[in-house]
């Protein structure tokens, strides 16, 4: 079985860092957004994560932000149109407005992905 994605699928990772003491607020906002986005007809994946400590036996570089403050969301949409529909959702704009004063960055950092192979 091939590991390549279906043609046109948009995959990305969104990342942001909560301000100290605002982590739980950010998590609540993100979980509420998750419920909305997963109901979009073109959403294939929307999985929020909170960066956790590495297991003691793992050899890893240090995190760019304190553990527990960094949030990562893996996302996939059926195609560019589905991604555009996602961006146009009113709940996304409300989420971003509420998130802005709670995070270090000006906005989420988006990294678009292309599968190898």
Image (spheres, rainbow, N blue to C red):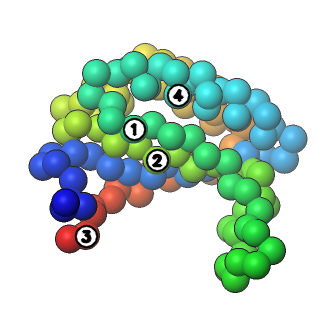
Residue sitting at x 69%, y 43%: 103
Where is residue 61 shown, x and y percent of the image?
68, 80
Q: Residue at x 33, y 35 (%)?
A: 44
Q: CA distance from mark 4 to mark 2?
A: 11 Å
Q: Secondary structure at mark 1?
A: strand
Left or right: residue 117 compared with residue 105: left
Q: Is residue 78 visible?
A: yes
Q: Which residue is mark 1?
A: 45
Q: Earlier in the sequence, mark 3 or mark 1?
A: 1
Which SS class for mark 3?
Answer: loop
| Quadrant holding the N terminus | bottom left
Residue name at image x 45 percent, y 52 percent = 13
Q: Are marks 1 and 2 in contact (CB under 8 Å)?
A: yes
Determine the residue located farthest toward the left in the rendered image.
7
> What is the distance, in whole Å, between disc 3 and disc 2 at their CAs?
17 Å
Q: Which residue is mark 4?
A: 34
Q: Which mark is first along the chain, 2 or 1?
A: 1
Image coordinates for residue 73, horizontal then vertical, percent: 52, 45
Q: Quadrant of the C terminus?
A: bottom left
Of the numbered discs 1 and 4, the one sitting upstream in the chain is 4
Residue at image location 24% in from the left, 61% down from the top: 3
- Residue 77 or 110: which is nearer the viewer? 77
Q: Earlier in the sequence, mark 3 or mark 2?
A: 2
| Residue, disc 3 | 116
Q: Residues within 10 Å of mark 3 (few under 14, many from 20)?
A: few
Q: CA distance from mark 3 to mark 1?
A: 19 Å
Q: Are marks 3 and 4 in contact (CB under 8 Å)?
A: no
Q: Which residue is mark 2?
A: 74
């Amino acid at each position: 079985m091939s590991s390549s994605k279906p043609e046109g699928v948009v995959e990305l990772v969104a990342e942001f860092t909560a301000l100290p003491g605002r982590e739980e607020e950010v998590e609540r906002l993100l979980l509420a957004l998750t419920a909305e986005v997963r109901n979009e007809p073109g959403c294939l994946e929307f999985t929020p994560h909170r960066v956790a400590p590495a297991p003691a036996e793992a050899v890893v570089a240090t995190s760019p932000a304190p553990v527990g403050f960094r949030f990562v969301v893996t996302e996939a949409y059926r195609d560019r149109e589905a991604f555009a529909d996602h961006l146009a959702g009113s709940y996304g704009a409300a989420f971003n407005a509420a998130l802005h004063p709670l995070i270090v960055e000006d906005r989420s950092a988006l990294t678009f992905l292309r599968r190898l192979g």
